[in-house]
Image: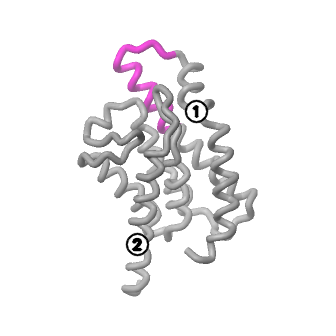
Amino acid sequence: MTNQTNTKELIKIALFSALIIIGSYIIIPLFPVPISLQSLFAIASGYYLSKKYSNMSVLLYIVLGLIGLPVFAGGKGGIQAIFSPSFGYVIGFLAQTFYVKYQKRNLSKLNLIIMFMISSLIIYAFGVVYMGVFFKLSDKQFDLWKLLFTGMIVFLPGDILKALIFSFVTKRVEKYI
């Protein structure tokens, strides 16, 4: 890669990390996991960055949060975030980039929506399992239905809306990024 390409990728990494952080402040507070725009930008970063760098913006976001910057949902940060029931979703943000980076570019709107929803399911898988383990270890009573409802089902309408927005915006800006 040329220096110009590396510089462009580094700028995109920083840009998407910043967008994920901004998305963490745009929240609807729910217990135990708030609704935010983080997933939209985490999925977009995996799609818009090259395969080599696709997970770097999410990794940078996680590192910034773990060293104490208030970048996680609701302005939280620090190593103690690992002990939050919602930290599994943060891990899911990174995990889904490994799926997204191997998807073709220039997908149809329908395929973009499908890719987005599969990415969301990957995030949910990590988030719900982590939350279940968290509640089990903290001796809180949470049955499977309540765990699935509060950890995934309540977010599905918002994710469908985010998928529609993502597909609409992607088809318009893809050639410029």
Instruction: Return the residue at label 1.
Output: 152
Residue at 50% x, 56% y is 97
Instruction: Return the residue at label 2.
Output: 11
Residue at 44% x, 69% y is 12
Q: Position of residue 170 (x, y in %)?
A: 64, 65
Let me know if residue 128 is in the magenta part.
yes
- Dot 1 surroundings within 10 Å: few (below 14), some, or many (20 or more)? some
Q: In this image, 137 relative to 23: left or right?
A: left
Q: Position of residue 42 (x, y in %)?
A: 49, 54
How far apart are the alpha carbons under marks 1 and 2? 32 Å
Residue at 58% x, 49% y is 119
Q: Secondary structure at mark 1?
A: loop
Let me know if residue 37 is in the magenta part.
no
Which picture quadrant has residue 159? top right
Residue at 33% x, 40% y is 76
Q: In this image, 167 relative to 123: left or right?
A: right
Task: Say above or below: 98 vs 84.
Answer: below
Q: Position of residue 28 (x, y in %)?
A: 52, 36
Q: Amino acid at mark 1?
A: Met
Residue range of the region highlighted in magenta in the rendering = 125-142
Q: In this image, 77 relative to 4: left or right?
A: left
